[in-house]
Amino acid sequence: MKLLLIISALLLIFSCSNSRIEEGENNDDTKTISLIAEDSTVVKDVLASTFIFQDGDREHLVFRDAPASTIYVVDRENGDLVNKWTKTGDVPGAFSMAARNLDISDSGEIVILDIDQGLRVFAKDGELLSRANPVASQWSFGGAFNLFRVNELVKIESQSFILYSLDKLEAEREYTAEYLQNRKNLVLTNLQTGEHRLILPFPEGSKFLSGKVFPFEDFRPRFVVNEKANKLYVVFQNEPVLYTYAWNDGEPKLESSKRIELPGFEENEGWEVGQIQMAQITDQTTEPFPARIQALEAVENGFLLSYSTRPTDKDNYTRYKNKEATADGFKQIIAETRPKTVYLDLEANVFPVDFPSMHYESFQIIEGKVHWMRKPDPGEEAEEFTVYWGKLRIE
């Protein structure tokens, strides 16, 4: 198993159309959308190398010090520490820095998915309740730390499952168009039995069925399940199309596809077979900073979609690719490729959103409220962290 964790880029890295895909519109002038803070919690006296808000419920907020595999459970009302525990080494339930952002179940368990170690379910005090092996030997594709939700807990016939993207790429296999045509992109793992099921091939009309091959990050899915409405919404990271499925208890059936007109988003058109490798995250020679959709979160009557674009200064970008970039030129690229967030309605129409500054340039939706961390003052070693939550105001 090969573990590729891009830790040095923690805060840095985070066109072809198909006639079958309907187009949404960019409606910048018709709505004003802003985020209004309603409440907050301050967590004090924390010494952690990378303190990241992960999830919450009505009673608690959960944080993680990712490099140390340490979990902090704090009181939502006053920020007091309720539980702190670490799972590393040979202890039962150990997980690594490769673990994804965790989830809290409806009954209060902490669910952690580590593609190296497998599934772990803990009580809030750290007691290991259940575990399961990984779906297969996987490659880890690290990147910038963020707060975005990457898994979803769902119920199927009264049993609990975690739904997540398949990060496994068989490095020993030949990377061909047939591989993509046969690939299934999501995994359902039963929290009780540990059994896995692969679902969701690429939908008809997707560019990933065009006969070209793509870097892995281009086709990683971002998704939302609405069990009450029997819907699964999917976007792939380098394909700005909203795919809507009937969820059907984990047997999704495609209902529609709508192109999303994201300002400044330029797609990769694909590479010929043999030009890139199976487990390649991106093409560092020709496209080191590709456009990527990084998050899709459900809100009232639509979604919040976060994405990054290619650098806008093409001359500076060319200098970077030719290894001629200056320090200031590199800083400019980082600024130009920072994530931005828009509101997306159910018809794939796009509206700008006025967001406050956020730590890790990211957020999470919990019980209908947007949660985010205050960005620390530059050059200050933070021992106090604030989590805000609020709602969107649409005018």
Image (tube, grey):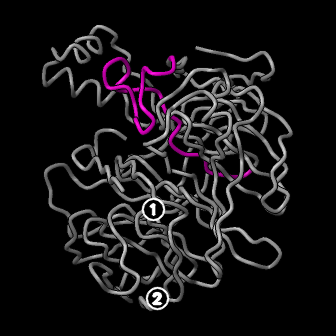
Give yes or no for contact between labels 2 and 1 (Cβ–Cβ under 8 Å).
Answer: no
Q: Which residue is mark 1?
A: 115
Which residue occupies 28% across, 47% down?
6
- Residue 294 part of the magenta-drawn span: yes
User: Does residue 138 appear in this view?
Assistant: yes
Q: CA distance from mark 2 to mark 1?
A: 18 Å
Give the image location of residue 310, x and y in percent: 41, 22
Look at the image and give the residue range highlighted in magenta: 272-300
Give the image location of residue 339, x and y in percent: 43, 37
In the rendered image, which quarter contains the N terminus?
bottom left
Q: Give the camera-side residue of 134 and 302.
A: 134
**Does 99 sit left or right of 168 as displayed?**
left
Is residue 193 depicted above or below 341 in this figure? below
Mark 1 residue crowding within 10 angstroms, few (<14) / some (14–19) / many (20+): many
In the rendered image, which quarter contains the C terminus?
top right
Is residue 208 depicted above or below 372 in this figure? above
Which mark is nearer the camera, 2 or 1?
1
Q: Which residue is mark 2?
A: 128
Q: Earlier in the sequence, mark 2 or mark 1?
A: 1
SS at mark 1 in the image: loop
